Image (cartoon, rainbow, N blue to C red):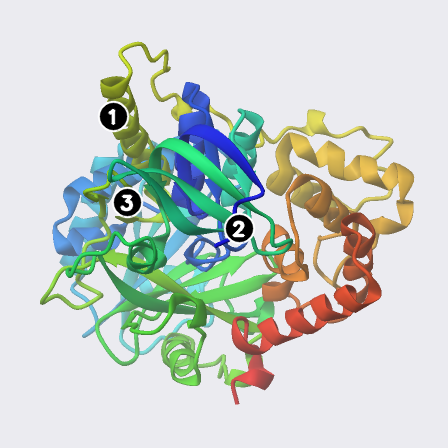
Amino acid sequence: MTEPDKEVTADLLVIGGGITGAGIAQDAAARGLKTILVEKGDFASGTSSRSSKLIHGGLRYLEQFSLGLMHESVSERHILTQLAPGLVRWAPFLLPHFRGKSKKWRISLGLWLYDHLARTAEDLKHRRLTAEQVLHYAPGMRQEDLAGGALYYDCVTDDARLVLSVVLDARARGAQIHNYAGVEELVRKDGRAAGAVVRDALTGESWRIRARQIVSATGPWTDETLRALGEAREQKKIRPAKGVHILLRRDRLELHQVAYIPSARDERALFVIPWYEGILAGTTDTEYRGAPDEAYPERQDVDYILDALNWSFPRARVTVDDVISSYAGIRPLINVPGKSTTDVPREYKIFESPSGLISVAGGKLTTYRRMAKIVVDRVVRRLKAETKELPVLPSWTHRIRLGNPSEEGFNPFASAGLTEDVRAHLLADYGVWARQVVSILEVYPEWSRPLAPGLPYILAEAHFAVTREQARTLEDVLARRTRVTLLDPGQGRECAEDVSRIMARELNWGEEERLRQVKQYNQALETKYRGARFLK
């Protein structure tokens, strides 16, 4: 390997830019540690943008008697509703009861425990429903064997935007944040991990990072990362499980809130979520043995979800032709021999290699902040053991607002001409940063045009994504900074030209690179985000 182009130092190097790595970087930077985060792709480009989009207490954990995990989940859910009210929103969840599919007493007991553990506010406590009331909330719901149900409350989010909000807060607190920066090798000193050589995937530039402590938070890439860095042992740390979701048009189901419906094939249950302008449905849960980078939605995965939808909503007659987009995420479950992926608890675990490298795996989106705190606590103890005087603050991320949505973020003159749905979207997704998006329109008023018909995203967001949010590819903008890829029936093909031209100007792309970006984006639509035409 050639000599790195430059060298930097840090107290902590975080490998991985999903929600866990982002949370660790934020917590460490907020405590005063000199922190660097590197991510081999884009932020949240793995599991963290391919979840069920829920910040939830984990009702099904009761079936596994995982009361500790449930208590932690509901506690963190409460904190996140306070920290990011624009991104983490309360929503009613409909739980229908069908004879032969579930026991009514178990549902009632489970929901009572759920409210009790969460110390649920009176207006958010669950209530039992008759069959007629269930049909009021979901007119298209199956009537045969419908014996009633319940309504309870949990939270819906935009997972990729949540990750980005945490990343940007870490950066604002002094952390150096690098996407498209992959670790090529560890730097060792006296047998200990003392840094890493990192290469920028887009420019080819490399640099050496000397760090007093290194944490790997690479999710489904945990074992692969350990092998690549020469840290692997025989026992695998994680057990990858593939979860597929599909997106439909909002009008395809008669549904006014989230529904938790039974599978038509087995004893699992799936979420059906009115999400922005679409309906999100999933997930599957199958063993996965391939490379995490090559996990794509397959026709059999989609058919499993469609069967569940058509069982619970027989009038809808949903087919593969209704699928706008789909995606597959890999859950980094802790390796528990002898258990199915469905039965493996969604807990996290911290591992330490002989070199001192710390790895964290497992867990879920909801509990990221708590996981990060525990990891950084360990890092601080280690650093204090090496250095007697280490002025570090205790964790205080439970008080750090993310975006802090407020109408005060808008200049009413700058926002003139924006529709109400665009204003609402900007406030929810960007918070106080919304005014910076709107200020772009003072220079480029033509960028108030929508990225896609029927969606609230505007062209100015593409400029903001590049200049403020480190977007480097067309997919970064259309699939994660906005969700055009998932929600637009055309999956962003129509706006790809305009967006790529905005990016080309800011990133100094030539015409050849711009066209390559468009081609690369279209290839991603054929593999990672398959709509109906690529599922047949």
The residue mark sitting in front, 3 or 2, is: 2
Residue that extends furthest to the left in the rendered view of this protein: 338
Q: Residues within 10 Å of mark 2 (few under 14, many from 20)?
A: many
Which residue is under mark 1? 382
Locate residue 169, reporting x and y percent: 54, 31
The residue mark sitting in front, 2 or 1, is: 2
Q: Is residue 123 left or right of residue 355?
A: right
Question: Vertical placement of 340 versus 150: above or below?
Answer: below
Locate residue 83, reporting x and y percent: 47, 30
Q: Secondary structure at mark 3?
A: strand
The one of 21 and 201 positioned closer to us in this rendering: 201
Q: Secondary structure at mark 2?
A: strand
Locate residue 35, reporting x and y percent: 45, 30
Residue that extends furthest to the front in the rendered view of this protein: 2
Q: Residues within 10 Å of mark 1 (few under 14, many from 20)?
A: some
Question: Vertical placement of 325 versus 335: above or below?
Answer: below
Give me the C-alpha separation between circle 2 and circle 1: 27 Å
Q: Which residue is rendered at x = 66% and y = 58% of the image?
A: 473
Q: Residues within 10 Å of mark 3 (few under 14, many from 20)?
A: many
Amino acid type, mark 3: Ser
Question: Vertical placement of 407 versus 525: above or below?
Answer: above
The first of marks 3 and 1 along the sequence is 3
Which residue is under mark 2? 199
- Give the number of marks: 3
Give me the C-alpha separation between circle 3 and circle 1: 14 Å
Q: Visible in this render: residue 278?
A: yes
Amino acid type, mark 2: Arg
Q: Visible in this render: residue 165?
A: no
Which residue is under mark 3? 359
The first of marks 3 and 2 along the sequence is 2
Q: Is residue 127 left or right of residue 476?
A: left
